[in-house]
Amino acid sequence: MLDWLLITPAQALEVAVATAAIYWVFVVLVRVLGQGPLARVSSSDLASAVALGAVLGRAALGRTPNFGGGVVALLTLFAMQALAGQLQRAARSRRLLDSPPLLLMAGTEVLHENLRRSHLVEDELWPRLRLAGIGSPSEVACVILEPTGEISVLRRGTRLDREMMRGVRGAEHLEALFDVGDRGP
C-alpha cells in the first residue's frame, strides 16, 4: 500500500550512486563541450533541456521510481551541487570544472575560432548585441562568453582594465583597448 513511499537502503544507495554519476557526467560534458549550449535558449534548446532532464531523472531513479527514491535523488543532487561549490573555491578544481571566459568579439572583429570552440555561430551574436543596446558592431569594445554561459557585451568607450580581463581566453586581442596607463605586468 505504501510501496510508492518506501525505499530500501539498497535501493536508496543505488539511486544515490546513479544520481551522483549522472550529475558528474553532465558536468564533464558541459566542460568538454563548452558553455555555449548554456548561452542560448531557443525552442529546440528548451526541448533538449526538458528531454535531458527526463533522461537524467529516469537514469537516477531506476526502474521503478517512487517518492522515497525521488527524495534520495534530490538530496544527492543538492549534495553534488554543494560539493561542486566547495571544489570551485579551490583554483585548481575551478579550472577543471568551469570553462574559462572566452572572448568572442574584439571591437568589430568576430573571433570565429572562439565561436567554434564555444559551439556558437555568428548569427547567435547579433541578438545578444541588440539585447545589449548595440546598434552597430562599431559600438562594441568586446563580447565575452562567461563561464555561466551568459554573454557580456562591453561598449566601445568603456574603460577596459587589464585586471578585469585576466583569465579571459583571447584577451590578447584587446591590447589596443586597454587603458594607456594600464600596461600591467
Image: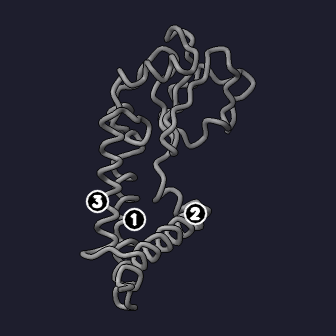
Give percent across and percent down for residue 135: 53, 9
Q: CA distance from mark 2 to mark 3?
A: 24 Å
Question: Which residue position is annotated with label 1?
Answer: 23
Whether tag 1 and tag 2 are in contact, CB under 8 A, the answer is: no
Q: Counting other residues with Cα less than 10 Å from the Cα at mark 2, is it few (<14), some (14-19), or many (20 or more)?
A: some
Coloring basis for residues: one colour
**Secondary-structure class at tag 1:** helix
* Chain-order first, disc 1 or disc 2: 1
* Chain-order first, disc 2 or disc 3: 3
Is residue 121 among the parts visible in the rendering? Answer: yes
Identify the residue shown where x is 51% and y is 32%.
Answer: 151
Q: Nearer the viewer, mark 1 or mark 2?
A: 1
Identify the residue shown where x is 42% and y is 79%.
Answer: 68
Q: CA distance from mark 3 to mark 1?
A: 12 Å
**Secondary-structure class at tag 3:** helix
Question: Which residue position is annotated with label 2?
Answer: 85
Give percent across and percent down for residue 66: 36, 76
Extreme residue in the bottom direction: 9
Question: Which residue position is annotated with label 3?
Answer: 55
- Amino acid type at circle 1 is Tyr
Q: Nearer the viewer, mark 3 or mark 1?
A: 3
Q: In which quadrant of the rendered image does the N terminus lie?
A: bottom left
